Image: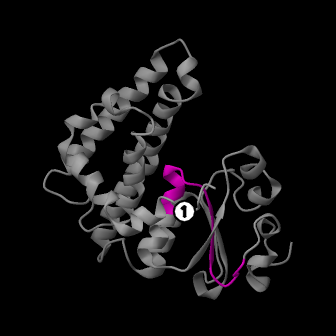
Amino acid sequence: MKDLASDGIDAHPISRRWPAKDPTVLQLYSFTTPNGVKASIALEELGIEYEPHRVTLADADVRSDAFLSLNPNNKIPAIIDPDGPDGVPLALFESGAILIYLAEKTGKLIGKTPTERYEVLQWLMFQMGGVGPMFGQLGFFHAYAGREIEDPRPRERYIAEAKRLLNVLEGHLDGRDWVAGDYSIADIAIGPWLRQLGPYDAHDHVGWHDHPNLNGYLDRFLARPAVQRGLTIPART
């Protein structure tokens, strides 16, 4: 492979499968899952010019040599920014890392002081380490293939953990519009996963309607024009 720093996006192996129409702008490789739309929503909120590439969750895409050359963990989203730190192209995976990078690149959505920055980061980590993995397992055991497992304990465990996490957020959001002061990448991380409880058909099981603060919070999140756009990028068809 040619050197990405000197030859740009076209030098990266992923470009053979998903070629860039405009290699001068940020390239997004993603799908409209809760983790995937974190990146597209952030890009829309921040007004960064980018080119989206639809990478499905099928093995033919995420386990292809082309995609693995960008993310060896075979998960979306991933990006290549031709205008990375010091003007050198940057390839990056992991949704949380991408959110931090985009926020720091623009100086937006990550607080205005060091104290505010760490408050944003702690709630981002709360999503990355708790809400995302636990809600994802809830979805697997309640809505997808795991529901066929007769042992009720996995499903009960993740329902209980989802309830606990929702209660944490419900209490924290009392008197707050957003989780860390102003709207931030922490909200961009959390909002899509709260929304996903609907497609999982899990609202009744986790007591969603008993959380008025969370209901209002999600409504505010989904009302943002950049969120509405980001939720549909990349287009599924």
Residue 186 in percent (x, y) is at 37, 60
Judged left or right of residue 207, residue 191 is right
Q: Looking at the picture, does residue 221 appear above or below residue 205?
A: below
Looking at the image, residue 136 sits to the left or right of residue 178; the answer is: right
Residue occupying the point 85% across, 77% down: 2
Residue under label 1, please give it. 233
Does residue 119 sit above or below 161 in this rendering? Answer: below
- Quadrant into which the C terminus falls: bottom right
Q: Is residue 235 left or right of residue 207?
A: right
Quadrant in the rendering for residue 14: bottom right
Q: Is residue 179 among what the camera can see? A: no
Q: Position of residue 52 (x, y in %)?
A: 62, 68
Q: Determine whether 28 is above or below 163 in the image.
A: below
Q: Amino acid at mark 1?
A: Ile
Q: Position of residue 124 (x, y in %)?
A: 39, 57
* Residue at 38%, 28% in the rendered image: 159
Relative depth, front residue between 17 and 163: 17
Find the magenta span and give its range.
Answer: 21-39
